[in-house]
Image: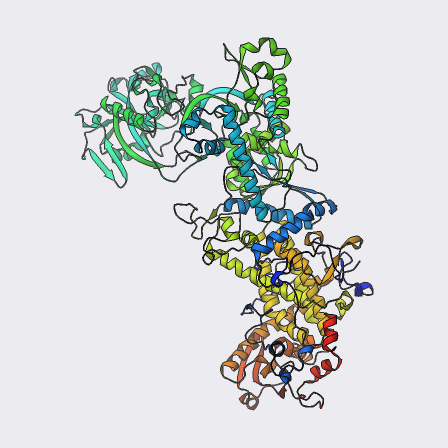
Amino acid sequence: MSLFKSVASNSSFFTPREATMAMRQSSPYRVLSPKAGSSLRKTASTNLLGIKGSSSVRVFSFLNIARCSSYSGGEFYSSSKRRSRGPVMAAKKASQGQKEEEGRYKHTVDLPKTAFSMRANALVREPEIQKLWDDHQVFKRVVDKNDGGNFVLHDGPPYANGDLHMGHALNKILKDIINRYKLLQNYKVHFVPGWDCHGLPIELKVLQSLDQDARKDLTPLKLRAKAAKFAKATVKAQMSSFQRFGVWADWDNPYLTLDPKYEAAQIEVFGEMALRGYIYRGRKPVHWSPSSRTALAEAELEYPEVHISRSIYALFRMVSAASSKDSLLEEFFPDLCLAIWTTTPWTIPANAAVAVNAKLQYAVVAAKPLLEDAHLSAGNKKKRVGNVLKEPKLPFFIVAYDLVPTLEAKLGIKLIIKKTLLGSDLENCRYVHPVNNIECPVVIGGDYITTESGTGLVHTAPGHGQEDYVTGMKYGLPICSPVDDDGKFTEEAGQFNGLDVLGDGNDAVVKYLDEKMSLIMEESYEHKYPYDWRTKKPTIFRATEQWFASVEGFRQAAMDAIGHVKWIPAQAQNRISTMTSSRSDWCISRQRTWGLPIPVFYHVTSKEPLMNKETIDHIKSIIAQKGSDAWWYMTVEDLLPEKYRDTASEYEKGTDTMDVWFDSGSSWAAVLGERDNLNFPADLYLEGTDQHRGWFQSSLLTSIATKGKAPYSSVITHGFVLDEKGLKMSKSLGNVVDPYTIIEGGKNQKEFPGYGADIMRLWVSSVDYTGDVLIGPQTLRQMSDVYRKLRGTLRYLLGNLHDWNVENAVSYHELPMIDRHALFQLENVVKTTREGYENYQFFKIFQIIQRFVIVDLSNFYFDIAKDRLYVGGMTSFTRRSCQTVLAAHLLSLARVIAPILPHLAEDVWQNLPFQYTIKDGLVADFVFESKWPSVNEKWLAFPIEEIDFWGKVLELRTEVNKVLEVARMGKLIGSSLEAKVYLHASDDDLASRLQKMCSAGNDADALHRIFLTSQVEVVPSVDHEFVQNIAHTGEYAVEDNKVWIGVSRADGSKCERCWNYSPQVGSFTEHPTLCARCFKVVGIQPTPAMAEAVS
């Protein structure tokens, strides 16, 4: 069925895939209150890329139109400064009770009529629209009707621990834009929102709300109950905020990681990994947060730019060389030392070896006494030399050969090279531990030992560093970690027992080394250092008994899977590949109460873990029914399967919970794998760039380990939201932009007005989200201005279609060329915006639509169209042809902007003055039922020579406007309608074409209508005498040819009705003040009563 019934006999206008329109009748969905004339819709804007040359079809975008239309409050759609508004003003004056003769033709002027308000009134209208959607279950209704394939964008769960920020807004709105576009593309969109409800952030919130006495009485179950209550309340609050953003989702059935079914699915993932041998328990160094008293994953760390450590250069006295290398170093004993450098002096008590690089060259050096004062400083890097350098005789020591000059400068001493040798020559040499005096070996480390800093020899404590641990395992070194959960030395550290390793314990170790003549120098060292992302305090590496996922077992499979995923932007693939290829085993256990328990039992005596298929399946079934609280309130006997009941007294429950990244990383199994209509893998994951080491990676690892493939087909990442200066938002800086304040406004409404959700969504579409994005008051004002202009455009369309009937449509081949050109431009906009949506490049859509609305429509087509719309005659061919084009623009623009600005699009749709039907004759009562505009190849097939010609016409129009402006400044004319334009083209073909436009068969293509002047004359030549009589002239160069432009006063008198000048004014006895066109219109125009009935 065609779009217009008139196409039944001539299908060339719209394609058969378009829907039909009929005069709108009352609809049960037009229930929105028409308060103050406002209606239920909003607008979107987008900035036009230069369409020119962007596709195989040549497109002309009017790049040279200089002035943009402005919108005054009472003006329906204001025109450019040069445009005469005579008919409009005359009608207004008459309606305001001015003299009858001044408004005698007011009833013949067809002014726009619509209830669609120029003011968005977003704080009222958006909630009304959302209620309309909810009342009629529009999201579900559209999904049920769509018969395309499934589209699943799997939602990454935000933490349920506070209010939403701009990062949340950017993320969820991007997802909603994609989902809404897919709805218009006939997909069955399934979007299940989720929340991460376990973990330390929520536990800390609960603990912070309690006083000391309440904390003492807090049992694990009481804490868990409070944490669950807090999480659920936060979910409810965040859900309400997301809905206010205009986000569509299955809000009645979200997924929460604390739901028993979710927890059971997570236990199953853990069990599968354990049974495949990927889960193990071991004692190895992990990131430990003393402030949180738990192990942390890499994704739970942050690295502030400025952290200052207390670094030291120290000497470890050697006692023997390797048996095979005795002769190399014999001459230097007993005064030979190893020089090491470390930024963590507190780890010295746990030292087990000194590591060297086998391939590096080392030197035995003799040191001459101190050359400078003992206390040195350089900026904020304070230095202090140790007591050993104050001695008259200094020991020999070994350093990397390439670092000798650097160390001389840093230490302020002369280093004389006595002997050189390879690092491999030092292997198995022995030295005395500087604290406990036991002998320790020199070992060969890895490529992490370089000459970029330090001494080239690395103090190795396997209990306090990953690389140290690997080296220690290779040599069977003891894994010593004399530090407790609070970050304090234990009794194993001897004299340092009870001291804080990051505070007085560090100081005590440095002081001890100096007293023992082992400290060469200490200095402040500025570098990146891992902090707990929750407490914002430094962490340490500490060896503890933890549960790990052995990534090595499936690393290559994960790397292969990454290559089969589409990453947007493309460089994201490199980032996650690097992180996955280099990551160590994943520590998945946490020493906290609020989380899903690791389902393991330990033998009371041997401490051997009990965990197998029977135990895991049994616990899974319990948790599925009762939730994870059962682990705390049920006995070991009840938690164990039947076969273990008799020996239950020999076991105890484990107390560790799972890493929250394992929680969220199992969502593909708990949601995609469990819910109807969802598919695995998901079509798309979309989160912030920090999730390459977070949710993207944890989801990938769990899925690869158990299913052998990635849980997503495509992944999009976005940057962080910064203020307008590019600074990170913080309360201390006072630069936080709050999404709630953007929508509802602040306490000071003048300073912080409420813009509504669509303005925030428009901002999301305007930025290139693949990098960090900026927002602030100025940005929001700009978005508001763009939105206002787009809303004005849509209001213009609605108002000028108030009397539109499908029966009045003009077939494509009968349309004036200017109208066909307008449809060509429209179809290209629809085509390029579709490409933008498909490629997730929303900022290009913003640019395209913004330029199209402001330049191509407002400054050109709408400006020219007013004459034929308002005074061309209600039933005239030119008015009906223009309305045919306006109807196409209205229907296409409303749908094109709908994913970005759904409230505006729906507001427009609810104010359509006609019905729009889709297949099977069903009425699209809501914009998202209307589907994406069908491709119209006929409109795109606008001849290339016509594209070129109209490009020249528009450029010529710009130059004519310049000359008109000069004439206005010279007081020759006021309005452009007082002018007559003369043209002379040196190119005969162009001159002929322009001449035809001067006597066009239809008024719409007439050149004087396009220039908005009363007359245009193409002259065959311009001699000196002719030019002398033309007050203002100009010139337009087109390729190798030129067009001369002249402006004089228009011929004839001013028409009272249309304000055009014509020699025919005064020729009609009955209407002596009218031109020929207006005389004809007035003769056939309906009476005021009839006109009212038609409208």
Residue placed furthest toward the top: 646
Residue 474: percent from left, percent from top = 44, 19
The image quarter containing residue 12 is: bottom right
Q: Position of residue 934 (x, y in %)?
A: 72, 56
Side of 580 where 1021 appears, left or right: right
Residue 709 visible in this rendered orientation of the protein: no
What quarter of the picture does the N terminus occupy?
bottom right
Return the residue nearer the eye: 118 or 319.
Answer: 118
- Does 677 appear above or below 73? above
The residue positioned 39% from the left and 36% from the top of the image is 528
Label count reads: 0
Q: Is residue 241 left or right of residue 484?
A: right
The colouring scheme, among rainbow, by chain, secondary structure or one colour, is rainbow
Q: Residue furthest right?
A: 9
Q: Position of residue 524 (x, y in %)?
A: 30, 35
> Image height check: is 329 above or below 735?
above
Whole-percent x, y for residue 75 in the image: 58, 70
User: Which quadrant of the figure has residue 233?
Assistant: top right
In which quadrant of the rendered image does the C terminus lie?
bottom right
- For the point 27% across and 17% down, the residue is 330
Displayed quadrant of residue 625: top right
Residue placed most toward the observer, 18 or 399 = 18
Q: Is residue 1009 visible?
A: yes
